[in-house]
């Protein structure tokens, strides 16, 4: 005879990033579920704390249709639209305000931030809220294997579960000595994983030492950075090894790139400003006097532009609009803000995020094969998929028959 299994049902959520915490929150709204959160590190929420170390950008003001167009990866068409309609940027902002008691504000370029500069207060409030909802946290527990109905930890502990939500994160910013051991347990089940690689990362260039002496650590503000992938206005930062900054994260790729140092000036305006000096000066010296170029921008022109272009005013004006650069490599995963790759969407039911090969096991957050630019899209993607997986796991456990 088929009967409903008796309450309470055990639910295991693995991870303690935004995707896991949000999944646990949703699960904890259902009576009769006994929820355990398992985190491999000694303390929860490491990446939220890292992300928040210089201001936590939690979402973006874009309306859902435009917001959802920022996601790349193997998700089916309209997946993101549906996920974000179900738990939208506005829902997330309300949750931070009402449930976590944290103030947010809309910053420049449409990005929302938590008012408190460090994320520790928000994380504390979140953990406190979940504890009050009855969610139990087990730290220092690394999941090495998962199956329908059980989770196995590296230290030998085993948890029985009526449903499992995995929110293990991506592969960025992980210490090299700390490999992602869960990957082999997925591979042994024949679950397709796209290899993780750096996303939202800096790019390398062969800078001349003389240039670095003048420009290392300095920004080139309000420029337009372009590659074959696209163009973005913003600030790029000169580093010892190359360039960092949102435009580079968004459109960087190995190969040719160019920077328009003065996007608000046309070629003709640059030329006429430089020509307005009557003295017989070289183009660069005219530019220093007449154009609002930063120290780093001037150093870039002086040290990295083809010599011939610095002699002729017409060519110089063209150069200011498009300094040519060669990006030689992306920075490693250990430094990247996020990773592309992860569990291929063909492996999950897109309505529930349940693994097709392991019924009762749901995936959320950056461990799935999606990626997005900086600007609040990453955390929003994590929490919205956390809601979807949490809700589906609750339904699965409660409807389960034994
Ligand atoms: C420097 C930096 C700055 C960032 N700034 C922003 C920003 O301002 N805005 C934004 O939107 N995003 C930002 N991000 C990205 C954002 O932090 C991530 O996209 C987000 O944390 C992903 O959430 P997640 O829950 O999927 O994974 P994570 O937050 O990575 O959480 C995964 C958790 O699972 C645990 N875990 C992994 N494997 C196991 C296992 N086998 N057993 C048990 N536990 C395990 C991990 O220890 C971790 O705690 C930033 C990232 C970095 C590195």
Image (tube, rainbow, N blue to C red):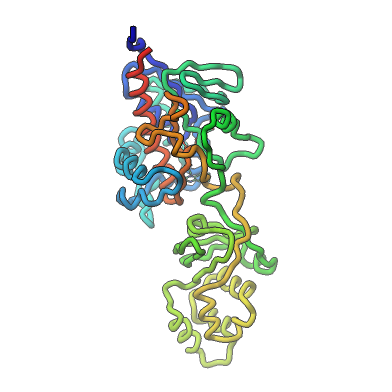
Q: Between residues 259 and 362, which one lies in front from this camera angle?
A: 362
Please count the marks in the image: 0
Q: Measured from the top left, where is residue 151 in percent x and y?
A: 51, 21
Q: Between residues 150 and 205, which one lies in front from this camera angle?
A: 150
Specify the farthest residue to the right: 209
Vertical comparison of 176 with 356: above or below: below
Q: Between residues 143 and 95, which one lies in front from this camera angle?
A: 143
Q: Residue at x 41, y 47 (%)?
A: 377
| Left or right: 12 in relation to 104 | right
- The quadrant the N terminus occupies is top left
Does residue 270 appear in this view? yes
Specify the farthest residue to the top: 1
Q: Residue at x 42, y 36 (%)?
A: 122
Q: Measured from the top left, where is residue 249 in percent x and y?
A: 51, 55
- The quadrant the C terminus occupies is top left
Q: Measured from the top left, where is residue 221 in percent x and y?
A: 49, 65
Q: Measured from the top left, where is residue 18 in percent x and y?
A: 44, 36
| Left or right: 305 in relation to 114 | right
Q: Residue at x 37, y 20 (%)?
A: 397
Q: Between residues 401 and 105, which one lies in front from this camera angle?
A: 401
Residue 265, image quadrant = bottom left
Q: Residue at x 31, y 48 (%)?
A: 64
Does residue 114 appear in this view? no
Vertical comparison of 351 with 322: above or below: above
Vertical comparison of 75 with 191: above or below: below
């Amino acid at each position: 005879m088929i009967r409903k299994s008796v309450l309470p049902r055990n639910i295991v959520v693995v991870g303690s990033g935004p995707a896991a915490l949000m999944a646990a929150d949703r699960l904890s709204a259902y009576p009769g579920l006994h929820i355990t959160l398992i985190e491999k590190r000694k303390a929860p929420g490491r990446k939220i704390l890292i992300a928040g170390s210089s201001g936590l950008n939690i979402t973006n003001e874009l309306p859902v249709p435009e917001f959802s167009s920022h996601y790349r990866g193997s998700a089916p068409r309209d997946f993101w639209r549906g996920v974000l309609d179900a738990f939208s940027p506005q829902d997330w902002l309300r949750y931070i305000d009402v449930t976590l008691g944290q103030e947010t504000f809309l910053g420049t370029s449409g990005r929302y931030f938590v008012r408190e500069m460090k994320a520790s207060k928000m994380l504390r409030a979140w953990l406190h809220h979940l504890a009050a909802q009855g969610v139990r946290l087990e730290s220092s527990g690394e999941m090495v294997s998962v199956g329908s109905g059980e989770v196995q930890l590296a230290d030998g502990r085993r948890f029985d579960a009526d449903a499992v939500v995995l929110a293990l994160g991506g592969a960025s910013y992980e210490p090299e000595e700390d490999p992602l051991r869960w990957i082999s347990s997925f591979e042994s089940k024949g679950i397709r994983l796209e290899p993780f690689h750096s996303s939202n990362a800096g790019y390398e260039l062969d800078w001349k030492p003389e240039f670095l002496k003048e420009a290392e650590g300095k920004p080139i503000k309000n420029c337009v950075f372009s590659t074959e992938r696209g163009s973005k206005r913003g600030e790029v930062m000169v580093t010892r090894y190359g360039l960092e900054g949102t435009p580079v994260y968004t459109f960087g790729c190995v190969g040719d790139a160019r920077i328009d140092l003065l996007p608000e000036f046309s070629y003709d305006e640059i030329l006429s400003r430089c020509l307005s000096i009557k003295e017989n000066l070289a183009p660069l010296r005219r530019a220093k006097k007449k154009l609002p170029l930063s120290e780093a921008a001037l150093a870039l022109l002086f040290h990295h532009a083809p010599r011939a272009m610095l002699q002729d005013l017409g060519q110089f004006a063209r150069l200011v609009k498009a300094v040519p650069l060669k990006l030689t490599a992306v920075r490693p995963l250990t430094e990247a803000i996020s990773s592309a790759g992860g569990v291929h969407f063909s492996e999950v039911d897109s309505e529930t995020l349940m693994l097709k090969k392991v019924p009762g096991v749901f995936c959320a957050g950056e461990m799935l094969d999606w990626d997005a630019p900086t600007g609040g899209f990453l955390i929003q993607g994590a929490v919205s998929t956390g809601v979807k997986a949490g809700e589906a796991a609750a339904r699965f456990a409660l409807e389960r028959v034994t």
